[in-house]
């Protein structure tokens, strides 16, 4: 056994651990970025004084979106598991790692698009006055620093 073997083994283990931590951080960041702003729900259900029919329509939209969101979040988590496995097995930024990262980015992009479509679908239910207040909340949420 070479005198460098323990050092090489430590480097490999450190690389695998860093890959796993990086994957976990990526999922957490992606989920935080994709999550609707907490002020949006309060604006919709408390500040805008929705009529019963508006509330029912928005609840249907929210229920439908929740399923789509869960599916895309699960895809992002699966992609990060694949990334962790690729790094653990190859200890390199190879084709498997690139494929997992591309898969994660695709799911995150789809989630962001679905979120915007969902927000616009909810906006379509509102009166012009409600929509103006809703737009202000959306603008503030998108411009805020998530940290």
Image (cartoon, grey):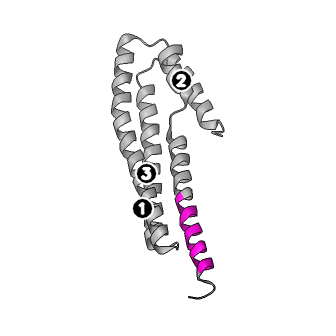
Sequence-first tag of 3 and 1: 3
Q: Where is residue 143 in the image (x, y as percent from the top left)?
A: 64, 37
Q: How far apart are marks 3 and 1 (CA)?
A: 9 Å
**Image mark for residue 77:** 3
What kind of element bears circle 1? helix
Above or below for 65 versus 109: above
Q: Please report contact status of discs 2 and 1: CB closer than 8 Å, yes or no.
A: no
Task: Find disc 1 in the rendering and name its residue.
Answer: 82
Which of these two is toward me, 90 or 134?
Answer: 90
Query: What residue appears at the point 42 percent right and 45 percent down from the top-left corner?
Result: 73
Q: Where is residue 105 in the image (x, y as percent from the top left)?
A: 47, 56
Which of these two is toward me, 87 or 17?
Answer: 17
Above or below for 57 versus 95: above
Q: In which quarter of the image is the N terminus?
A: bottom right
Query: What residue appears at the point 38 percent right and 41 percent down from the top-left corner?
Result: 70
Magenta stretch: give its range.
6-20
């Amino acid at each position: 056994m070479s005198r460098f073997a323990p050092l090489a083994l430590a480097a490999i283990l450190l690389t695998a651990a860093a890959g796993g931590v990086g994957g976990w951080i990526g999922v957490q960041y992606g989920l935080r970025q994709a999550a609707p702003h907490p002020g949006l729900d309060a604006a919709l259900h408390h500040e805008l004084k929705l009529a019963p029919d508006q509330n029912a329509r928005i609840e249907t939209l929210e229920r439908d979106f929740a399923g789509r969101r869960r599916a895309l979040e699960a895809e992002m988590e699966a992609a990060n598991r694949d990334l962790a496995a690729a790094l653990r097995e190859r200890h390199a930024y190879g084709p498997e790692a690139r494929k997992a990262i591309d898969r994660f980015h695709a799911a995150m992009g789809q989630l962001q698009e679905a979120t915007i479509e969902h927000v616009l679908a909810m906006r379509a239910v509102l009166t012009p006055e409600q929509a103006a207040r809703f737009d202000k909340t959306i603008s503030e949420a998108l411009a805020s620093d998530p940290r």
